[in-house]
């Protein structure tokens, strides 16, 4: 029997009360993270990735949000039952978080040094002097030149990439057991993105921290994560090791996501973003949430919500049918052929008209 | 920093000149003169008085003197002659710090003496008033925002709405009535009461500061609410900081920034508000002096105090801009 996971989320439900009704932002989400493991959470914007991660930190804005059900077991303790003061001992200490937008995530009126040392003094009981030395070490660890000088600068004196490095340094300050990185590169230029990913990869190996790496870009998780969960409309729709997921995606949504990544090997000839929009989280339905956009949709999909089921060893997917990528290829080719036939027919029609008149 | 101050001080010069120009023009448009009396005064007396105060000269430009001196003393003296007018002479003296004799005193007292004598009273009134507005308005706004939609919030909303919408002469008169009818406090007649800090300043100061206090309350409330939902506040919470630290270290300073911007206009509001409040409460400050001067067409007093008020507001704005930089490093460094 393997060691108990560091984090185990079980049937998490998160709701927001809004003027239009109750938004079910996270539905019955379950996953786990082992010590030292990197888990990727992938899904398009609005699929509930941030809400899930903020729930773990118990930082859901409340009201309007609330954890309506489920458990968040961290090292055996259920964080859902923790008091605010118990949570404060966890936040920034045993679990820390890096946010999407480094431009707005640092306090503009406080020096970087002050913002870095506050958690060190709070959680590790360091004196200001010790905390400052530790902050210098952390900044050089994330590759910021002249760290002792930069500590006295304000956030606006740093570029976006540098600010994200500062955020990462802050996140790692108290040697957390779990680091949650919520789209840490989304707001950055492509070249800077690559540098930040490289940095995270290196730090992951150096520190052994478990990481939840959130992104809307499957391409980014490839070199980064051990396991991936795919979220859609507040649900986990597929879960597998990164290798398995890339090799053998089984949920049509994941297949669509993978096919929309531009491939370097040139096998793919057409970039295929998934058409359509994710469903309204206000309505409670009992159909497959992906049905309106699914290429494989069948009648049963409109009357039954698929739950996660085992499709291969250590691989679960939420689809009623056994679908794989080859079928997608076949379907796509069929679709293209149909479209072309329709186009030809239309053209012939026009030509016939012209000849007649 | 020094460069900024020098630039701002220099920029005040054209502003003050323009204020003088407009005030002088408006005074000239008003009917009547400083020596109009109920009963007839001998025309010779009026002529004498006009001579004494330079009112026999043309208002703006003395072209006659220009032509005279042009032929007699050459162009340099001629230009001086051109400005040997009411406005020209006034400005020349004002630049040297002489704002001229007050008409009311028939020339025995200068305007600057009068300002020196009355301004400290108004300054005390204004400072108490501003302190009141800040010390009450800021916490009330913060409390309202942190306890959004609770009884605190509604209390702060009611207070600020009253302070904001009811004019000071109404609140002032009501307070006066309440003080005299309910508490039997007699109106103050003894001018020596106002010489140092005394409790007598508080009723007028609070009434004067009510509007500003209300404005600061509302602004602080919305500013704190805005800052509360910023990403960096979420970052601070994610570090495990307690509410107190998050509020004191991360929220307050950021929410001060918009509040500081309105302190400039607030100071101006206190200045103009003091005209009415000083009259209502019979405070012998520069505000009531100014109102008196308007009634008696005391030209030099009107000009002098208008310029002084403008200077005050301009200096207030410079100070506000400086404190802005103290709080917001983004401005300091640019
Ligand atoms: N403060 C909020 N109020 C109401 N609804 C919210 C709020 N925050 C998130 N949601 C809802 O939760 C859903 C998931 O949001 P989020 O977790 O931020 O998505 P992601 O991070 O995957 O892009 C959104 O579609 C939104 O409807
Ligand atoms: S259940 Fe039906 S609609 Fe849903 S993903 Fe599978 S095939 Fe598509
Ligand atoms: Mg998000």
Image (tube, coloured by chain):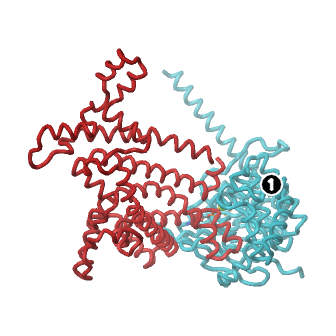
The residue furthest top is B71
Nearest to the observer: residue A260 or residue A103: A103
Quadrant position of ligand 2: bottom right
Please identify the quarter of the rendering in which residue B95 is found: top left
Residue drawn where x is 82% and y is 68% of the image:
A312
Please identify the quarter of the rendering in which residue B236 is found: bottom right
Left or right: A98 with respect to B284? right
Q: Secondary structure at mark 1?
A: helix
Chain B representation colour: red
Residue drawn where x is 51% and y is 63% of the image:
B223
Residue A222 lies, with reference to residue A342, above or below; the image says: below
Q: Where's residue A9, x and y in %?
A: 73, 76
Residue A56 visible (yes or no): no
Chain A representation colour: cyan
Q: Where's residue B163, x and y in %?
A: 35, 67
Label 1 beta carbon less than 8 Å to ligand 3: no
> How many numbered tags mark residues here?
1
Q: Chain of mark 1?
A: A
Residue A103 visible (yes or no): yes
Residue B317 lies, with reference to residue A133, above or below; the image says: above
Q: Residues within 10 Å of mark 1 (few under 14, many from 20)?
A: many
Task: List the residue tagged with mark 1.
Answer: A196
Residue drawn where x is 73% and y is 62% of the image:
A214
Nearest to the observer: residue A187 or residue A33: A187
Left or right: A315 with respect to B91? right
Nearest to the observer: residue B212 or residue A156: B212
Q: Where's residue B251, x and y in %?
A: 59, 67
Q: Where's residue B270, x and y in %?
A: 39, 59
Nearest to the observer: residue B179 or residue A341: B179
């Amino acid at each position: 029997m393997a060691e108990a996971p560091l984090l185990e989320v079980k049937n998490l439900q998160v709701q927001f009360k809004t003027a239009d009704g109750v938004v079910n932002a996270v539905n019955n989400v379950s996953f786990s993270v082992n010590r030292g493991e990197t888990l990727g959470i992938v899904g398009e914007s609005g699929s509930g990735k941030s809400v899930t991660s903020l729930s773990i930190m118990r930082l859901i804005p409340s009201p309007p949000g609330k954890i309506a059900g489920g458990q968040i077991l961290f090292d055996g303790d259920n964080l859902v039952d923790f008091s605010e003061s118990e949570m404060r001992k966890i936040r920034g200490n045993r679990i820390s978080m890096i946010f999407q937008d480094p431009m707005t995530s640092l306090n503009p009126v406080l020096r970087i040094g002050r913002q870095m040392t506050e958690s060190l003094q709070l959680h590790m009981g360091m004196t200001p002097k010790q905390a400052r030395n530790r902050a210098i070490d952390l900044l050089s660890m994330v590759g910021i030149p002249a760290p002792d000088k930069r500590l006295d600068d304000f956030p606006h004196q740093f570029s976006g990439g540098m600010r994200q490095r500062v955020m990462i340094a802050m996140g790692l300050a108290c040697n957390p057991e779990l680091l949650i990185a919520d789209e840490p590169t989304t707001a950055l230029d492509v070249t800077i993105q690559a540098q930040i990913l490289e940095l995270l990869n290196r730090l992951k190996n150096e520190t052994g921290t478990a990481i939840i790496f959130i992104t809307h870009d499957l391409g980014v998780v490839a070199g980064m994560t051990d396991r991936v969960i795919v979220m859609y409309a507040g649900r986990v729709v597929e879960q597998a090791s990164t290798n398995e997921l890339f090799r053998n995606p089984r949920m049509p949504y994941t297949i669509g996501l993978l096919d929309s990544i531009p491939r370097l090997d040139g096998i793919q000839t057409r970039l295929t973003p998934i058409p359509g929009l994710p469903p309204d989280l206000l309505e409670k339905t009992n159909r497959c949430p992906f049905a309106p956009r699914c290429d494989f949709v069948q009648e049963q999909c409109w009357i039954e919500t698929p739950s996660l089921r085992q499709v291969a060893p250590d691989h679960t997917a939420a689809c009623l049918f056994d679908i794989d990528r080859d079928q997608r290829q076949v379907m796509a080719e069929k679709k293209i052929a149909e479209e072309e036939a329709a186009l030809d027919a239309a053209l012939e029609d026009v030509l016939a008209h012209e000849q007649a008149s | 920093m020094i460069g900024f101050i020098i630039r701002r001080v220099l920029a005040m010069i054209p502003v003050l000149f323009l204020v003088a120009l407009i005030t002088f023009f408006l005074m000239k448009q008003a009917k009547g003169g400083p020596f109009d009396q109920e009963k007839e005064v001998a025309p010779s007396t009026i002529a004498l008085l006009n001579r004494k105060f330079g009112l026999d000269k043309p208002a703006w430009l003395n072209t006659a003197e220009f032509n005279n001196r042009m032929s007699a003393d050459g162009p340099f003296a001629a230009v001086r002659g051109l400005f040997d007018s009411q406005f020209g002479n006034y400005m020349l003296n004002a630049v040297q710090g002489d704002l001229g004799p007050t008409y009311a005193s028939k020339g025995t007292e200068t305007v600057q003496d009068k300002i020196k004598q009355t301004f400290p009273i108004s300054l005390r009134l204004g400072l108490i008033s501003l302190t009141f507005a800040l010390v009450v308005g800021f916490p009330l706004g913060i409390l309202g925002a942190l306890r959004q939609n609770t009884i605190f919030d509604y209390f702060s909303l009611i207070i600020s709405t009253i302070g904001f919408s009811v004019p000071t002469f109404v609140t002032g008169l009501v307070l006066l009535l309440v003080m005299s009818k309910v508490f039997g406090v007699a109106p103050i007649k003894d001018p020596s009461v106002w010489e140092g800090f005394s409790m007598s300043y508080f009723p007028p100061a609070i009434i004067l500061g009510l509007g500003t206090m209300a404005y600061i309350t509302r602004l602080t409330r919305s500013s704190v609410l805005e800052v509360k939902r910023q990403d960096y506040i979420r970052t601070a919470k994610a570090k495990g900081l307690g509410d107190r630290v998050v509020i004191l270290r991360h929220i307050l300073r950021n929410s001060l920034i918009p509040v500081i911007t309105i302190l400039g206009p607030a100071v101006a509001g206190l200045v103009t508000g003091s005209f009415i409040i000083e009259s209502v409460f019979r405070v012998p400050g520069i505000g009531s002096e100014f109102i008196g001067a308007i009634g008696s067409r005391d030209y030099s007093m009107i000009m002098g105090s208008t310029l002084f008020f403008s200077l005050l507001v301009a200096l207030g704005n410079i100070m506000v801009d400086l404190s802005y930089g103290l709080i917001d490093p983004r401005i300091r460094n640019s």
